[in-house]
Image (cartoon, helix red, strand yellow):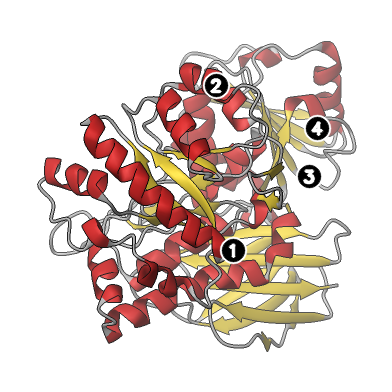
Amino acid sequence: MRRLVHCLPSVLLVWNCFALDVAKLVPVRWPGGPLEVTRRAAAKADPGILKDFYRPASLELLRDTPINCLLVTWSAAGDPAVLRAQQEMAGAYAKLAQQKGLAVLGLVYAGADPVQAVEAAQAAHLDGLALEPDFADFERLSQAVEGKADFLLIPLQAGGSSPGIRVLSDAGAAVATPTSEPWIDSNLWLVRSLRAKGLAPVWLGFALENPSADNDARAIADSAAAGGRWVAAPDDGLLTGLSKQQPDALAKWRRITEALGFFEEHAEWRRFVATGPLGIVRDAATRYPDVADENLHLIARRRIPYRLIDRTAVDAKALEGLKALLVTEISNPSESERALWKNFAEEGGLLVTGPAWGTTVPKDKECMEQELGKGQVVVYREETPDPETLSKNLLHLLGRGNLGLRLFNAPSVLPYLSASEDGKQWLVQMINYASGPSESITVRVSGSYRTARLYGLSGAAADVPMEKSEQGMELAIGPIHTYAALLLER
């Protein structure tokens, strides 16, 4: 039933008959009311100002911000009397918000009665519901919304985590990989995976472990760079500070809304297509989806730019420009697929496959390398080769000089490479996952470009000088605090 929830049209008609373009919604968690106070009390957390937060004054906090969609506390398991009071208060507040041009979705928690939540939301003229990641009663929910084409449902995706450097000890020492680089937690790969599966929009619903202006901005950029959204979630301390007009809270709020606004100003970047020398063929029917996702995670951490190609869309055109093709997810290739892969290798490509290729790999070896025409085939003995080893081997087999993009002096930075549909623009988005600024960074990209402009989350864009090298163009861009983007024009 989850599939039915996801497969909603991208543009829906809401209750008052204006067009609600889901792609343009900029959501924020906006908790409050007696149900939220009860939830906090159960978790032994201080409810702060949330009991009385749904007042007209709190809507003024959204003035002159890009936020246009509120996720208000709506439904959860508990006392029916508290639930009725919550929905009466949140419904009245939603009416005020909608009068100001804001969309309002009711936030539904695990254990909520989906039928009651839908009926109450429609009676209150909410624009729809947002489902917490732990909500699971999709069967009853789908029955409740059947025939209601004017009702929006958006599931908040599970699996995301606070982006940053993973910490080993209280002293702040970062966990290092075998290559002595810090271990980076990022959601770039997750957003890409979800989008490749056809999910739209992709809203990540995790809570930050340590809310701060920098961490909020990083979480926003980490999801937005790949075309998704992290649902901004002001913590209780920030909401309290904002209600009291405290300067530090107002400054933090400006940083958060500034980051949200940056990606709305550059919404055209969402239409750019991920590019790179590696193609990863995805199979929706893979028997090992967790392994497939871990491959994406670790390949991204190795800073190997890649394209995701759905198995049903693989043809000669889809493979143009690739130097390597990873097909370990395909355990039952057809003859036409095998012929296409073989031709790719014979023409000079690197094919990385598994036992379905038909080569017997000795038990004392993890994989075997074979020459095929002008190229090479690497066959793994197991259907699910170790993702850490696979990502490391891919970097070695491809060679750093063939990646198309390299960053120097940037151990805490991950890039995301994409291009406009006509190929005339290349976009290098870079997220710094460390708590402090990166050092001065040098970016090397293959190809030749006329201009390069550097963007940050604040301030004006600036032209960046380029120097030609044997492997492309080099650009010195200085330190990155949280996020930067290079837009290259051919």
Q: Nearer the viewer, residue 204 or 461?
A: 204
Of marks 1 and 4, the one in the foreground: 1
Residue 330 circle label = none
- How far is disc 1 from disc 3 in space, using C-alphas? 46 Å
- Per the image, the residue denoted by label 1 is 101
- How far is disc 2 from disc 4 in space, using C-alphas? 46 Å
Say if residue 62 shows up in the picture. yes
Q: Residue at x 61, y 64 (%)?
A: 406
- Per the image, the residue denoted by label 3 is 322
Q: Is label 3 in a helix, a strand or a loop?
A: loop
Which comes sooner in the sequence, label 1 or label 3? 1
Q: Residues at badges 2 and 3 in contact (C-beta under 8 Å)?
A: no
Residue 142 circle label = 2
Disc 3 residue type (three-letter):
Leu
x then y, percent, for residue 251: 36, 82
Q: Is label 2 in a helix, a strand or a loop?
A: helix
- How far is disc 1 from disc 4 in space, using C-alphas? 55 Å
Mark 2 Cα-neighbour bin, 10 Å: few <14, some 14–19, many ≥20: some
Position of 141 with respect to 250 (left or right) is right
Q: Residue at x 28, y 37 (%)?
A: 83
- Per the image, the residue denoted by label 4 is 345
x then y, percent, for residue 158: 42, 37
Q: Residues at badges 1 and 3 in contact (C-beta under 8 Å)?
A: no
Disc 2 residue type (three-letter):
Ser
- How far is disc 3 from disc 4 in space, using C-alphas? 11 Å
Q: Nearer the viewer, residue 358 or 424?
A: 424
Q: Residue at x 47, y 17 (%)?
A: 140
Mark 3 Cα-neighbour bin, 10 Å: few <14, some 14–19, many ≥20: some
Which comes sooner in the sequence, label 2 or label 1? 1
Disc 4 residue type (three-letter):
Ala
